[in-house]
Amino acid sequence: MSALDKTRAHIVAVGLSLFNRGLTHGSTGNISVRLSDGGWLMTPTGSSLGTLDPSRLSLLDAAGKHIGGDAPTKEAFLHTAMYQQRAEMSAVVHLHSTHSVAVSCLHGLDPHNVLPPITAYSVMRVGALALAPYFPPGDAKLADAVRALASKHHAILLANHGPVVAGRSLSAATDAIEELEETARLMLLLRGEMIAPLTAAQVDEIKKRFPV
């Protein structure tokens, strides 16, 4: 099996896993992986992550031109905006996962760090979660908003929409977005309770030991 075919199979396996565990639904969510030649594989527009066909994944060249497979996700600009600002990242995952979307609809969020440091793993895998303002799906202004935040944040929550996360590998991006969803769930469960988040000193220690 070629490296490209292995990447295709990995995307399909990740999509199915996310779908089967209720982290995506219908035709929501999309995945991309940067290839060694600078191009990308992306999930196609209107596709369900639970029924991806490896042969129909969208192939783009380094200039972003569609050169194979079905047409790419209409939210491809979210992915390319992340890659443009984070050259070290090799994969991007975007979901409409329930608890993360619920948090994205709350009033009064800190736009620089949406989630409190509830656990060490949220600090390790997500870091400071920035909030991008709301724009309609497909609006190019959303790409500009993500691009403006991506140089300092590998995880961004889109207001009234959902999370987009970049990682050094597809596994890393998936781990991070799942940790984000779990932290969002914990945040909602703990609303109204007196919580004891990690202190600034504890957060700094984690960052030194496990750079995001």
Image: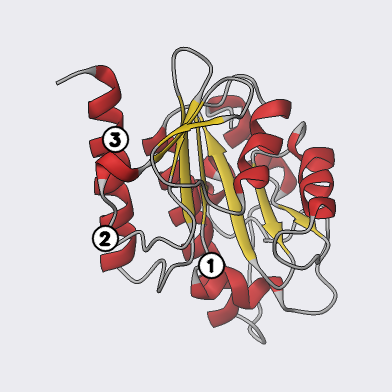
Give the amino acid type for the residue marked by disc 2 in the picture.
Thr
Query: Crowding near pointer 2: few (<14 within 10 Å), some, many (20+)?
Result: few
Tell which circle, 1 or 3, labels the residue nearer the N-terminal end: 3
Which residue does the numbered mark 1 point to in the structure image? Answer: 96
Q: Determine the residue located farthest toward the left in the rendered image.
A: 1
Q: Nearer the viewer, mark 2 or mark 1?
A: 2
Tell which circle, 2 or 1, labels the residue nearer the N-terminal end: 2
Q: Nearer the viewer, mark 1 or mark 3?
A: 3
Residue 148 image position (x, y, % from top left): 84, 40
- The reply to whether dot 1 and dot 3 touch (C-beta < 8 Å) is no
Tell which circle, 3 or 2, labels the residue nearer the N-terminal end: 3
Query: Crowding near pointer 3: few (<14 within 10 Å), some, many (20+)?
Result: many
Which residue does the numbered mark 3 point to in the structure image? Answer: 8
- At a point 74% along the width and 37% down the height, the residue shown is 150
Q: Is residue 184 above or below residue 176?
A: below
Disc ID at residue 3: none
Give the amino acid type for the residue marked by disc 3 in the picture.
Arg
Callout 3: SS: helix
Distance between the Cα atoms at labels 2 and 1? 17 Å
Q: Is residue 133 above or below residue 107?
A: above
Which residue does the numbered mark 2 point to in the structure image? Answer: 51
